[in-house]
Structure formats: C-alpha cells, structure tokens
C-alpha cells in the first residue's frame, strides 16, 4: 500500500487505528471522511489549508514596521489592563490602519502621519481620524522606551476640528424619548436601559455590575475607565424596573434573554434592533444612543 505524504502535514493513525491528518504549522485538520486520504479532494483540502495559512502569515505585522509597533503595544500590560470598551476602540483603530501597517518605522514622521490623518478624515470622519491619532500616541509612547521608535511623531499632528454643523454626539434624551424606548424594549433590554438611565453609568459599566455590588439601595462601583470608586443610589424608578425584570441566575445584576451576563456586542445588537423597530413606526429620535442616555440623568 502506497503511503501518502504531503509536505507540511502530519499523517498518522490514532490509537484506534483511524487515519488522521493535520497541518503542522496551524494545527488545521483535514476531514478524512469528506476528503479520503490520497483522493483528489484530499489534496485540494491540503492546498486550501496551505493557501489560507500563507494568506494569514502575510497579514502578520513585521518587525520594524508600523504594524510591528502596534503588535508590541498590544503585548504591553497597559493594553491588556484596559477596559473591554477601550480595547474595542483601539482594535478598531488598528483595523483602520491595516492598509499602512507595512510602513517602515524609519519612514514614519509627523508629515507622513498628518497625511494619513487627512486621508482618514476624508474617508471616515473627523472624529475617527482623531481617535486613530490618539491611538498612535499611545502606541508610540510605549514603544519609545523599548527603542522601537525614537519620537512620538503623532503628538504633533493637529486634531481635526469638530464641524460647526455636526450633530451632538451621545446627546441627552428627552423624558418622552426615554418613555417611548423603555415602553418598546424587550424586558431584558428595558432593564439594562433603565440601569443606564437611572445611574448615569456608562453602558459597559452598567452591564458588568455584579449582584454583590448592590447593597440595599446603593450600588458600589468603580468605573472601568477610571477605576474611581463611587456609591450609586438606587432610586425608586430603578428599583421598580429591576423588580419587574425577568428572573435569572447570572452573577450580574442584568442579564440577556438567555439568562447569561450581557456582552457589549449582544447589548449593542439588541439596541440596534430596537432602533430599527422604532424607525419603522416613526418614533425613533435622531441621535439617540445608550451613551447619550447616561447623560440624561444628570441633566
């Protein structure tokens, strides 16, 4: 019987005598039921795995490039200790910079970054361009002590001004808007929105509140972003909303429809579904966001 060999793949019989095959570099397995060993389908499957592995390797950041600096920063304890929301923000900025990640560090200077900043403002928005600038400031700040770059060239890039006709971001809601949204939300989403509305907490902070952080009519909370402690009062409105929320066994005060702690992405998806529902009925308020809802309480 001819023994099949494919470069880069390990082919063997497991302890039950069944043939197995996987790509050594990535660990991807070949399904030998769908692609029997030695068949044309088998060699096609191997070629597909190699092609995908090669493509992924090409995307990996290279040392001495902007992508390498970003990778070095992400390995820093500072990045690892960021809140989930901040990590999402910085990862978004890194994704935007993907097309220029192979830029050599030796060619990075303020004029180059200013040109990139200008292009991002035209392609996306003034705000997103400024957020990418702020991200690069952090990247360079932590790479300078490592000798990976000599200067924080991003700091000298001038921020884009906010357009005078730009709508207010995360504006406060009116009382009528609050009542309309709460009345249309599912029970689980309503409880989460009520928590944000009544406490003024950031959505990510509100979703992560644990049961043991609530002591009677007070919630003890340190903001994920600042780590500053605060005693947040539970008013009668919030107490009523939590009492009417569906029962669950999650460790958090709030829970999704599955009875598990909310993820930010799950909450965001639920919010956008509700927004689309309100848009169809004509009761959607322009510029309403959960972050804006937290501004409603103090105003």
Image (cartoon, helix red, strand yellow):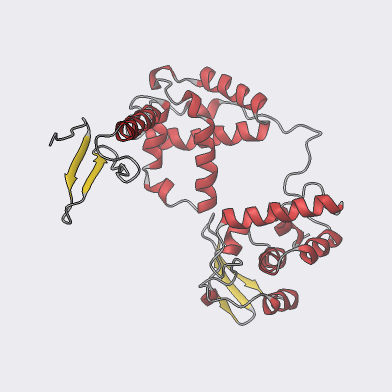
Vertical placement of residue 223 versus 121, above or below: below
Q: Quadrant of residue 21?
A: top left
Where is residue 62, by image quadrant? Answer: top left
> In which quadrant will I find the C terminus?
bottom right
Q: Position of residue 52 (x, y in %)?
A: 38, 32
Q: Is residue 267 above or below residue 191?
A: above
Residue 32: percent from left, percent from top: 29, 44
Image quarter where the N terminus lies is top left
Residue 14 lies, in percent from the top left, at 18, 52
Direction from residue 55 to residue 4 in the image, left or right: left
Q: Is residue 52 above or below residue 224?
A: above
User: Which residue does the image show at 42% across and 23% down from the upper left?
Assistant: 102
Q: From this view, report whether residue 205 is shown above or below residue 233.
A: above
Q: Residue at x 32, y 46 (%)?
A: 33
* Residue occupying the far left of the picture: 1
Nearer the observer, 212 or 33: 33
Q: Which residue lies at the image location 49% right of the left edge and 35% below the top edge?
A: 94
- In the rendered structure, the answer to whether residue 37 lies left or right of residue 285 reads left
Residue 45 picture location, percent across and down = 34, 35
Q: Give the residue displayed 56% in from the left and 70% down from the top.
A: 259
In this rendered view, identify the residue nearer to me: 192 or 156. 192
Q: Is residue 41 left or right of residue 234?
A: left
Q: Residue furthest bottom?
A: 216
């Amino acid at each position: 019987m001819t023994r099949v060999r494919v470069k880069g793949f390990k082919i063997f019989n497991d302890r039950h005598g069944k043939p197995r095959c996987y790509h050594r570099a990535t660990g991807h397995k070949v399904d030998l039921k769908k692609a029997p060993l030695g068949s044309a389908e088998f060699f096609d499957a191997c070629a597909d795995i190699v092609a995908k592995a090669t493509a992924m390797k090409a995307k990996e950041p290279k040392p001495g490039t902007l992508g390498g600096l970003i990778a070095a920063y992400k390995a820093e304890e500072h990045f690892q200790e960021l809140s989930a929301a901040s990590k999402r923000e910085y990862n978004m900025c890194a994704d935007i910079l993907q097309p220029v990640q192979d830029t050599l560090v030796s060619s990075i200077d303020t004029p180059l970054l200013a040109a990139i900043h200008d292009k991002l403002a035209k392609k996306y928005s003034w705000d997103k361009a400024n957020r990418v600038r702020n991200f690069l400031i952090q990247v360079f700040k932590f790479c300078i002590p490592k000798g990976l770059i000599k200067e924080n060239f991003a700091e000298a890039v001038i921020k884009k001004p906010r357009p005078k006709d730009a709508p207010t971001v995360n504006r406060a809601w009116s009382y009528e808007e609050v009542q309309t949204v709460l009345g249309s939300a599912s029970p689980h989403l309503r409880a989460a929105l009520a928590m944000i509305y009544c406490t003024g907490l950031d959505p990510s902070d509100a979703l992560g509140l644990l049961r043991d952080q609530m002591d009677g009519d007070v919630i003890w909370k340190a903001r994920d972003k600042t780590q500053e402690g605060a005693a947040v009062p539970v008013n009668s409105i919030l107490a009523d909303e939590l009492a009417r929320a569906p029962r669950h066994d999650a460790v958090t005060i709030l829970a999704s429809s599955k009875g598990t702690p909310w993820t930010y992405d799950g909450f965001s998806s639920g919010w956008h579904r509700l927004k689309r529902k309100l848009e169809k009925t004509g009761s959607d308020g322009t510029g309403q966001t959960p972050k804006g809802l937290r501004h409603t309480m103090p105003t």
